[in-house]
Image (cartoon, grey):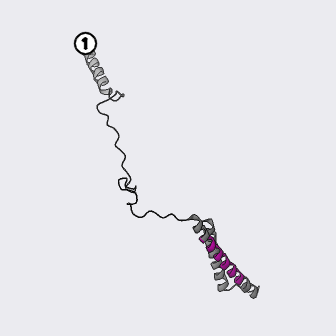
Amino acid sequence: MTESRRRVLFALTGIAGILAAEPLLGAPQSSGVRPPPPPRPSPNAPDPHVPNGMNGPQPTTTDGRAVALANQKELREDIARLYGMVSELKEQVERTDANSMLSVSLVKKAQQIEKLAKQIKDLAKG
């Protein structure tokens, strides 16, 4: 009799296990599936309900050619200024004695030239 009780107990345990594992094994569920939520519009996107021209002033587009010409003009002015500073430094170095130490003004002038050259390089890169 204990043998039959064990068989019934094992059978009930097996059936309970199968019933418990059925949802986990991927049985199709038609009633519990929800559709994905609709996408939310960006708060920065223009309002599609407002007529054209009512959104305020239209963004102005910058003319790339005008910007390039302005950069080129500024670049030429900076190069002319750099050339003048280098010429002055060269004259000052030629006037100093080769055996003496460089003055602080010469070192500062060289640092200013380096700074301007870096600005020109950055401007040329765009």
> Judging from the image, what secondary structure is the residue with disc 1 in?
helix
Residue 124 placement, left or right of 45: right
Quick check: 33 above or below 47? Answer: above
Q: Quadrant of the C terminus?
A: bottom right
Q: Most prominent secondary structure in the magenta stretch?
A: helix
Quadrant of res 66: bottom right
Range of the magenta residues? 70-89
Quick check: 109 above or below 13? Answer: below
Queried whether the magenta region covers residue 118, the answer comes back as: no
Residue 3 locus on image (x, y percent): 26, 13
Which residue is at a point 63% across and 82% down the rendered structure image?
108
Quadrant of res 53: bottom left
Quadrant of res 76: bottom right
Provide the residue designation for mark 1. Answer: 4
Which residue is at a point 62% across and 65% down the rendered structure image?
125
Residue 80 locus on image (x, y percent): 67, 78
For the residue carrying disc 1, how many other residues have a C-alpha within 10 Å: few (<14), some (14-19), or many (20+)? few
Indicate the amino acid at tag 1. Ser
Tell how many labels.
Answer: 1
Q: Nearer the viewer, residue 75 or 115?
A: 75
Which residue is at a point 61% across and 72% down the rendered structure image?
119
Residue 24 locus on image (x, y percent): 34, 30
Q: Nearer the viewer, residue 111 or 55?
A: 55
Q: Nearer the viewer, residue 53 or 14?
A: 53
